[in-house]
Image (tube, rainbow, N blue to C red):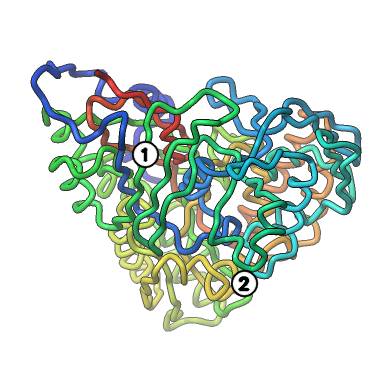
Amino acid sequence: MRKEKSGMNRREFLKQGAIGLGALTSPSLTGLSWAASKDRVTIYHGSGMDSLHPYNHSSSPLYGLWEHIMEDLVDIDYTTNQWAGRLAESWEFQGRKWVFKLRKGVRFHDGSPFTSKDVIFSYNRIKNDKLSLQKSNFADVVEMAAPDDHTLVLVTKEPNVVLLDRLQNRVIISSAAAEKYGDDLDKHPIGTGPYKFVSFKRDGEFVVRRNDDYWGPKAEIREVVWRKVTEEAARIAALEAGQADVIYSVPIHEALRLERHPRVRVEKVAGLRMYFIALNPAFKPFDNKLVRQAVNYSIDTDALIKNIFDGNGFALNGPVGPNVIGHDPSLKRYPYDPKKAKELLAKAGYPSGAEIKFYYSPGRYPKDKEVCQAIANQLTKGGFKVDLIAQEWAIFWGLSGVNGGKLPMYYIGRGSLTDADTLYDQYFRTGTTKRVSYSNPEFDKLIDEEQKTGDHKKRLALLQKASKILMEDVPFVPLYDLADIYGVVRNVIWKPRPDEQILAFEMKIRA
């Protein structure tokens, strides 16, 4: 066992994440000129739009981008960790039925009224569109009805207590616009949101302009520009030069330096993204549990946190972290033991080592290239021969990659994780998605049962049993939770959410 832990403990991690580093210093703002204004704010991010199909993605940052134009029924209030209404005013769980009362007086950007028929149209497109990467969220929904314009009824195969989690980020589009534009609908993104679509360049720039007829509080900033810039150094340089006003994923070693910049501050929040390595049993050698366990014994997560993230995170001892519903405090991760890994490989029939392909998408996550290179080196010491493969995000995450079940082993982060069911259902339940072709009837039975169990204690126990199965079968390697660090110009008043969504309509400009 290791005597020293390299990462900070969870209490220290959350304490640091609770404040922006910008609160530590407050230089005078007098006499400085700003690019950010009530007219325009520019955001640089590692993720960008690959298309204007609102359902052809499954990524927390892109959910936040779409939420400016189109809205979902419900959202999480992270100050209370409770569900809050957006286009839905209230809802009621009635066993196999969920009944939603929708907000009245809401209009789409084209002037057409928002009704329950628009919700059903949108959800049917999510379910049936061949390019949709969100259809698994509606796998249990067997019927949708609109008793009137502002009532929606969703019927599930079995009682499903986690349906609200499935509906978050499932944005609503206009059925009237679909009738008007037909196959060209996605060239005209029309929603009910606080901003209207202006322009788009694939994998580049995305521009929106304030919706002055918005049903809710009007955004202060008139125009918002997103630019995809995958290199961290380029994002930081743009922030310092005044080309960007908000940037995502500032390395911890750059944070203190940026704090000394007269125009820039750093904002930090404990993130909800759980990072892990997926091991797909549909591919050799990961069809053998001993090999999957050998991978786990080969990886020194504490060293990754210490040497790459300067201790700015904490290692996970199970499938989910302590702040997630379903966490089991009794679980322990596999200790770093490359000798044990080699023994298991030999036992599995690979005495000379096993050849593996390890995929990642550079620029998508903080320090992902450095992380994956370090992991590849650690795996080599455990007896693996690693082919490290970098892919553009659209290919990596699309139907030819993760969502098509085409990758044997990959580095990934599951964002906005507040309930273990979200991870377990999407990645490990048989047949829900193709992301990891893992199948265990006992695990599936537990997930089926917890999804229809309204008693919180009983449901928690079921999730914890499921997590024990995963830690034995290990179709993955749990790694860590990190703090999300943003660079922001000092005249933008904004606190980040823990789900990586940068919402410009929550920003104010200091005069």
Q: Residue 361's quadrant in the figure?
A: bottom left
Amino acid type at circle 1 is Glu
**What amino acid type is highlighted by mark number 2?**
Pro
Q: Would residue 437 be visible to someone looking at this image?
A: yes
**Position in image of residue 78 (x %, y %):** 54, 26
Tags 2 and 1 touching, CB below 8 Å: no
Q: Left of 145 or right of it: where is 75? A: left
As measured in the structure, the alpha-carbon distance from the residue carrying label 2 to the one carrying label 1 is 47 Å
| Residue 247 numbered tag | none
Q: Residue at x 88, y 45 (%)?
A: 145
- Kindly state the secondary structure of the residue where label 1 is placed: strand
Report the residue at 56% width, 31% height from top.
214
Q: Residues within 10 Å of mark 2 (few under 14, many from 20)?
A: many
Residue sitting at x 47%, y 57%:
412
Relative side of 439 to 260, left or right: right
Please tell me whether residue 466 is drawn above or below residue 21 in the rendered image.
below
Residue 281 is marked as: 2
| Whole-percent x, y for residue 260 in the image | 11, 29
Vertical placement of 497 versus 387: above or below?
Answer: above
Secondary structure state at the residue bearing disc 2: loop
Is residue 317 in sight in this rendering? no
Which mark is first along the chain, 1 or 2?
1
12 horizontally vs 79: left or right: left
What percent of the width, then of the height, locates residue 449? Answer: 84, 45
The residue singled out by tag 1 in the image is 223
Return the residue nearer the eye: 329 or 70.
Answer: 70
Give the position of the C terminus as an image quadrant.
top left
- Say which of 285 and 122 sits in front: 122
